[in-house]
Image (spheres, rainbow, N blue to C red):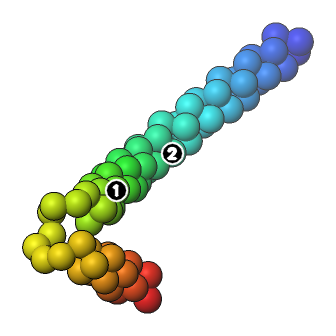
Amino acid sequence: MELDSKILAYRFVAYSALSFSAVAVLSVCITLPMVHNYMSQAKKNINRDVFYCKPGRLPGPPDRYNFLLTVALNKRYS
């Protein structure tokens, strides 16, 4: 009788560990592509912002740089 209860306890622990591991692997498989997408979007936005902030990248006088930067920021955040 004591042997049966130990087997049931070990079986419960094994199934619990297996379930926990499966949930952990599934979570990584779902969140890793999401993090990759977020990071690539952040990199794209940073590169675009740096492009607009560097002088000499846009044609026209320096006053026009500020105007174009303001227009670009307003379009992006509105």
| Callout 1 secondary element | helix
Q: Nearer the viewer, mark 1 or mark 2?
A: 1
Badge 1 crowding class, 10 Å Cα cut-off, few under 14, some 14 to 19, many 20 or more, is few
Residue 12: image quadrant is: top right
Q: Which residue is mark 2?
A: 27
Disc 1/disc 2 C-alpha distance (Å): 28 Å
Front-lying residue, 60 or 43:
60
Residue 23: image quadrant is: top right
| Callout 2 secondary element | helix
**Position of residue 25 in the picture relative to residue 51 (left or right):** right
On the image, the x and y values in percent for residue 43 come to 32, 52
Up-down relation of residue 26 to residue 74 (above or below):
above
On the image, the x and y values in percent for residue 26 come to 47, 44
Residue 21: image quadrant is: top right
**Position of residue 36 in the picture relative to residue 8 (left or right):** left
- Residue at 43% x, 89% y is 78
On the image, the x and y values in percent for residue 33 come to 36, 49
Q: Which residue is mark 1?
A: 46
- Residue at 55% x, 37% y is 24
